[in-house]
Amino acid sequence: MRLLISIAITILRAKLKQSIVAAVGVTFSITMFVALLGFMNGLNDMLDGLILNRTPHIRLYNELKATPEQPIAQRFDDRAVVHHFIRSVKPKSEPQRLRNAAAITRALEDDPRVLAVSPRLVAQVFFNVGTTDLNGQVSGVDVEQEVRYYMFSDYLVEGRASDLATGNNTIVLGKGLADMMAARVGDVVQVTTASGDRALLRVSGLFQSGIADFDKVQCYASIKTVQELLGQPRSYLTDLNVKLKDIEQAPAMARELAARFDADAVDIQTANAQFETGTQVRTTISYAVGVVLLIVAGFGIYNILNMLIYEKLDTIAILKAAGFSGGDVRRIFLSLSLIIGVVGAAAGALFGFAMQRLIDQLPFVTEALPTVTTFPVDYNPKYYLIAVTFALLTTWIAGWFPARKAAQIDPVEIIRGK
């Protein structure tokens, strides 16, 4: 085998330009495959992170809804021939609190599948700006939990999360809402609740998620501040946000928790199905483009080896006349193809990493994403493994057919023709 590889290298040197062209084709394909997938998946992670990083795996809450069975339906036997001329029955006026929130929290914290449970209290309010009232939503949160599990600090463009946690009657405004109110850190804003109560809150920070409509409405405060704002006791909560150790368990566990605690539950896959669909489409397109590039490189190797066989008919005839079998000739040209593939794959992986690093250094500045300064890149090693494996497979297939043709050449006919 060492002799066959030596002969293959000698043929490569004799046709060095064609060999370099074939190797460059493989190098270019792998470079673009790795760079494209790294960039596209980095972009996917960034776009999905705008929502998914701020979304719990399961959200438990109490949704306002009409009673499914009205008293008149309970009064009469279902077997009786009756008609109920009652429609559009309004739901009962009940606070949208989560019943037994403290007991539910303890039960979830004891569940081995649960990573963290974060309480939340959501209040619809109006911000009084002169004679204008701006609609807003204040989420009372456990600041420490939000920073640890929902990357709250990453979205603060002004102020610190600790100021919200330790301050009294403080609030973090969405950047869009703060701009409309011309409010800055340290200012005092007036808030009116749905029941008509008013309070003054000091702005301790500005929050920007990258979604403009969200930032024009959403604000954050501590749970204690929102409970005092609404005049509710410490046990009053509207939501429990659950982070799981395995996100894939979210759909099944949401149904389980809804039935167990008699509450409404929505999982992250259901709440953000459109983002997962977009991610899958972009990833599929990236893989498709990369595979096409590798296949095109394979055709280039196939054409070059075909021409090389016609140019080396004399060499093949001499090898066979000297005692080399058709299998030996086939192995020589397969080795030649794989050498091109290995050299091209190694160079492609190196240049691919260099291109990923280059993309990662390119400035990417936008007001919608203040925490992102350069283009996102995913350096997952699986892209290199997929690219190199597919490139070697492509070059082997591209070299098989010319090698098979070379093995079938009759040396007598070649020598007689000369």
Image (cartoon, rainbow, N blue to C red):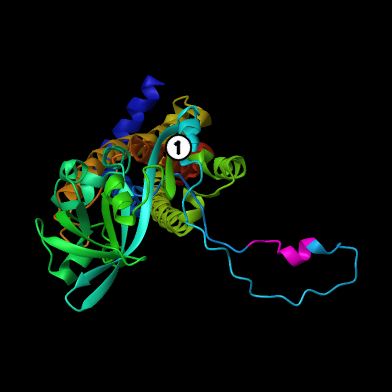
The residue lying at 32 percent from left, 67 percent from top is 196
Q: Nearer the viewer, residue 331 or 66?
A: 66
Question: What residue is disc 1 on?
Answer: 102
Residue 27 visible in this rendered orientation of the protein: no
Q: Which residues are magenta?
A: 67-74
Query: Within the magenta stretch, is there residue 70?
Result: yes
What residue type is disc 1 on? Ala
Q: Secondary structure at mark 1?
A: helix
Q: Quadrant of residue 276?
A: bottom left
The residue lying at 22 percent from left, 66 percent from top is 177
Query: Within the magenta stretch, is there residue 162?
Result: no
Label 1 crowd (10 A; few <14 / some 14-19 / many >=20): some
Q: Position of residue 160 (x, y in %)?
A: 15, 45
The residue lying at 30 percent from left, 57 percent from top is 138
* Left or right placement of residue 218 versus residue 206 in this view: right
Quadrant occupied by the C terminus: top left
Q: Position of residue 259 (x, y in %)?
A: 62, 43
Q: Nearer the viewer, residue 10 or 164?
A: 164
Q: Position of residue 44 (x, y in %)?
A: 35, 52
